[in-house]
Amino acid sequence: MKYPLSLKVNEEVFEIEIPANRTLLDVIRDELGLTGTKYGCGTGECGACTVLLDGLPVNACIIPALQVNRRSVTTIEGVSRDGVIHPIQEAFITYGAIQCGYCTPGMILSAKALLDRNPRPQEMEVREALVGNLCRCTGYQKIVEAILSLVKR
Amino acid sequence: MRLRKFEFFSPTSLMEAVELLAQHKAKAKVIGGGTDLIIQMKQKLIHPGLIINLLEILELKGIEKNSDGLRVGSMVNHSTLESSALLCEGWKILAAGSHQVGSPQIRNLGTLGGNLCNASPSADTAPPLLVLEAKANIVSPRGERVLPLESFFVGPGITVLEKDEILKEVTIPAMPQNSTSAYLKLGRRKSPDLALVSTAVILTLNPQTRICERARVALGSVSPTPMRAKNTEKFLMGRILDGNVIREAGDIAKRECCPISDIRASAEYRREMVRVFTERAIKQALN
């Protein structure tokens, strides 16, 4: 049995029909073809599937898509605008905060949510904001430095 | 990892949810933030044929202060709890408990009701609510019933909820004057982790004599359910809390709990950590 789902993703509204057992991650990647959001653990622990739901970071892999009917989602594709990368993305590149890149979309969205809420975080606050995003490659140092470089003086 | 098929309903009132659950109770589960339910479904531990979404029900989402104290709806999420001005004003220890849950992503989804109804012995909101002496309000087709949270937990993952009952809200009395509190959790790492041991403490000291007039202590992860450490409480009450008293309180708490050895830690280590963390929580509450 299929259910109607109306979802705003990166400012664009999608009206689709899906079975209830599709997670938000399934819909983003498979129905909408937005593959920037990654499948990591599938159990809400690694943060590779982080998206912003009404501006707040959540794990898309554990949300039944129908639960977010009529709400607004931001994926990594929505962070850049008209082909111009966001300062957070610029900083990640400049500071060498990307190795394999798999955790990066989730990291950037968690960072964006933090800076939108608090433009002047201390280092500890940055690290706490990222506890739900695991990185196997970088050891987190460059990621934290990249985000701190954006803190407005 | 594809979930098995299920039907999905999103009632907009509590009454509708209760009716739906009563109708389909054999195969239905309610969902809050889904941070426990969906994971258990992915682990193939449960296969509900029907899921009832409680997140659209406004009656379950309020935090309200009244003459009796505080009412917190079961569908309030941990992010809201950890940053609630009302909570920080008079019930800070609950905000502290919610802050320890998972990660920002999990806290933006997970609910108070879900944390309690999932009934993990290590649930972070449980020790704070136990020391606050909260009550649980449960609704069903038979009406409403209220019970102390202490009676709500039966065993690991098991509550008193019948298949057609929904936790509506918790009610929390005001903390006594001159009370201080602390909630501490020991994990293996700084990232999301289940507690190995957690301690919640509320102390009420006489401002002149400095005698502890009232003590509430609760422990998580060291017994089949979150528990009140009543021997420890009895010991603290009527005493001035100097170093020796605090040390002995830690020892009593250590003897009161009954942890198991599992993949995360041995029972022996947990017991010793109960001693350490009870001492630390008392000292933190006193500062």
Image (spheres, coloured by chain):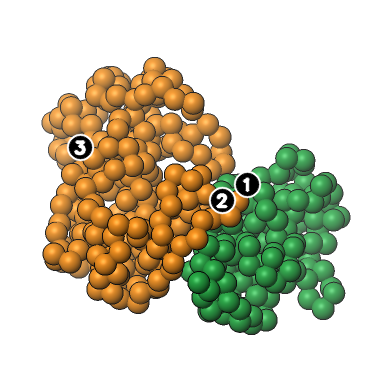
Chain colours: A green, B orange
Q: CA distance from mark 2 to mark 1?
A: 7 Å
What is the secondary structure assignment of the residue under circle 2? Answer: loop
Near-viewer residue (A16 or B207): A16
- Of the pair B268 and A147, the residue shown nearer to us: B268
- Amino acid type shown at disc 1: Cys
The chain letter under disc 1 is: A
On the image, which quarter does residue B29 sit in? bottom left
**Residue pointed to by mark 1:** A41
Quarter of the picture containing the C terminus of chain B is top left
Q: CA distance from mark 2 to mark 3?
A: 37 Å
Residue B242 % position (x, y)? 27, 25
Q: Give the spatial CA distance, label 1 vs label 3.
A: 42 Å
Q: Position of residue B221 (x, y in %)?
A: 36, 33
Which element is circle 3 on?
strand
Mark 2–mark 1 CB contact (< 8 Å): yes
Residue A83 point in image, percent of width and height: 85, 74
* Mark sitting on residue B215: 3
Q: Residue furthest top?
A: B268
Apparent side of residue A107 relative to residue B133 in the rendered image (left or right): right
Q: Quadrant of residue B57?
A: bottom left
Identify the residue at horizontal 44%, vertical 44% (top origin): B45
Q: Determine the secondary structure under disc 1.
A: loop
Tags 2 and 3 in contact by the CB under 8 Å rule?
Answer: no
Q: Residue at point 20% right, 59% down?
A: B137
Q: Identity of the amino acid at label 2?
A: Gly
Q: Please name which of the two marks, 2 or 3, marks the residue nearer to the observer.
A: 2
Q: Which residue corresponds to mark 2?
A: A44
Could you classify mark 1 by the number of other residues whose Cα lies within 10 Å: few (under 14), some (14-19), or many (20 or more)? few
Q: Quadrant of residue B222?
A: top left
- Nearest to the observer: residue B144 or residue B136: B144
